[in-house]
Amino acid sequence: MPYLPLSAWGYERYGVDLELPSAGCADFDRLEDEMRACCDHLYMMTDDGTYGEKGFTTVKLKELLEKAKAEGQQYDHCICIGPLPMMKFVCQITKEYGVATMVDMNCIMIDGSGMCGGCRLTVDGKMKFTCVDGPEFDGHLVDFDEAIARSKIYEAQEQKVFERRHHYCNLQAMADAEEAAQKKEEK
Ligand code: FES
């Protein structure tokens, strides 16, 4: 994942001093030591509080920006990578506080060849391809609503595939029943 190289680059270039990795629960690859090496302050966030602090990245981000503002400080730059809705809301917040924000849009890339068109997005009113023109863009210029809508185009088909994967097929059910009956007879 490009998170670590981006963090290291940001730390070197901007002296980034905080990191806000987040996940739904504690069950995720934390790469904590590696992230600690790229920052001064690390705030681990989980939606359910099973690891680090409970809450969304956006809430913590706002809290830190507000604290800096109250102390007459200002963060120079924000580097954001993650799911589209999270990046959208991070950008809304950093825009409000006047913090330049770079987003990494690799989450919408498919083949990375410039051929499939899956990574098309609008940046500052212009059509771009993430794998050709990015994957990093000025987050305040990205049309996230369009990107999110595009990411849902095949949602119904994806759901069907997901259901099929978790479908307990009739043949398997018959085989399991036969096996169970055999074991019962053997006893
Ligand atoms: S990922 Fe397919 S065109 Fe960019």
Image: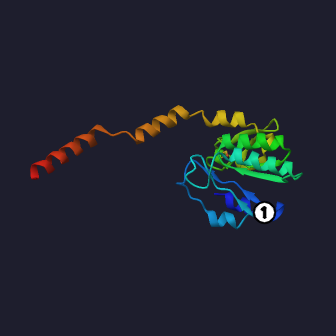
Crowdedness of circle 1 by 10 Å Cα count: few (<14), some, many (20+)? some
Q: Position of residue 25 (x, y in %)?
A: 55, 50
Image quadrant assignment for residue 59: top right
Please indicate, yes or no, whether residue 152 appears anywhere in the rendered image: yes
Q: Position of residue 104 (x, y in %)?
A: 72, 50
Residue closer to the observer: 148 or 133 = 148
Residue closer to the observer: 103 or 114 = 103
Where does the N terminus fall, quadrant-wise? Answer: bottom right
Q: Please say if 90 is above or below 33.
A: above
Is residue 159 left or right of 82 when viewed as pictured? left
Residue occupied by mark 1:
11
Please indicate, yes or no, whether residue 101 appears anywhere in the rendered image: no
Q: Position of residue 13 (x, y in %)?
A: 83, 62
Q: Please say if 186 is above or below 121.
A: below
Is residue 119 left or right of 128 when viewed as pictured? left
**Which residue is found at the position 41% from the left and 38% from the top?**
164
Q: Amino acid at mark 1?
A: Tyr
**Which residue is found at the position 77% from the left and 39% from the top?**
92
**Which residue is found at the position 75% from the left and 36% from the top?**
143
Q: Is mark 1 within 8 Å of ligand 1?
A: no
Q: Kindly state the secondary structure of the residue where label 1 is placed.
A: helix
Is residue 179 left or right of 92 when viewed as pictured? left
Is residue 155 left or right of 137 when viewed as pictured? left
